[in-house]
Image (tube, helix red, strand yellow):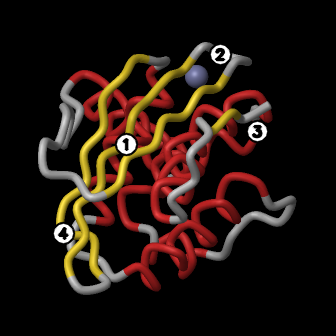
């Protein structure tokens, strides 16, 4: 059973890395931020279009490893149409999923939907930065920070 789940997660990551969703510049973005993970060399730009407290649209571009690209693709898919409060909550849940020493319970995993595919990185601390880079960059974009995000 556990093996099947891992295979499924692997498929999601491979798919989102090969065919990233919401990839490319967003010309009418309200917010933008760039993120860099020097440990792995992942670079990404995030473009956010807001509408009345919601994320109306969310795109990214850049280049990085399979985990960083798949994570950004999954994140943009998951957050489109969500309110900023919901986005903040998902960030917390996702961060918990990949960093907390306690394995999240099945309900927490289910709430994250496809984002849960990245649960495997929790066993590889260096990869956690690849998976969370897009989230930290989003936070920076929403907070209108002027300096690029670095995971170091
Ligand atoms: Zn990486």
Give the quadrant of residue 127: top right
- Disc 4 is placed on an element classified as strand
**Mark number displayed over residue 56:** 4
Q: Nearer the viewer, residue 104 or 47?
A: 47
Q: Is residue 21 left or right of residue 16?
A: left
Mark closer to the observer (4, 2):
4
Whether disc 2's CB lies below 8 Å from ligand 1 is answered yes
Image location of residue 84, percent across then percent down? 41, 79
Q: Nearer the viewer, mark 4 or mark 3?
A: 4
Please tell me which of labels 4 and 2 falls first in the chain: 2
Percent x, y for residue 93? 60, 71
Q: CA distance from mark 4 to mark 3?
A: 34 Å
Q: Quadrant of the C terminus?
A: top right
Decide which of 20, 6 is in the foreground and name it. Answer: 20
Name which of mark 1 and mark 3 comes first in the sequence. Answer: 1
Dot label at residue 123: 3
As drawn, the label of residue 141 is: none
In the rendered image, which residue does mark 2 sit on? 40
Q: CA distance from mark 2 to mark 3?
A: 16 Å
Residue marked by disc 1: 46
Circle 3 SS class: helix
Earlier residue among tags 1 and 2: 2
Using the image, determine if residue 145 lies above or below residue 105: above
Is residue 105 shown above or below 151? below
Question: Residue at 45% of width from left, 43% of height from top?
Answer: 33
**Residue at image location 46% in from the left, 18% down from the top:** 64
């Amino acid at each position: 059973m556990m093996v099947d789940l891992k295979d499924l997660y692997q498929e999601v990551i491979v798919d989102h890395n090969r065919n990233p969703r919401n990839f490319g510049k967003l010309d009418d973005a309200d917010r933008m931020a760039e993120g860099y993970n020097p440990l792995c060399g992942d670079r990404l730009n995030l473009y956010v279009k807001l509408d009345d407290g919601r994320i109306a649209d969310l795109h990214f571009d850049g280049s990085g490893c399979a985990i960083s690209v798949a994570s950004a693709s999954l994140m943009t898919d998951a957050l489109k149409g969500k309110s900023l409060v919901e986005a903040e909550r998902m960030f917390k849940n996702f961060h918990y999923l990949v960093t907390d020493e306690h394995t999240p319970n099945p309900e927490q995993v289910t709430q994250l939907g496809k984002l849960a595919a990245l649960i495997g990185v929790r066993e590889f601390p260096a990869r956690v930065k690849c998976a969370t880079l897009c989230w930290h960059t989003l936070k920076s974009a929403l907070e209108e920070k002027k300096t690029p995000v670095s995971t170091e």
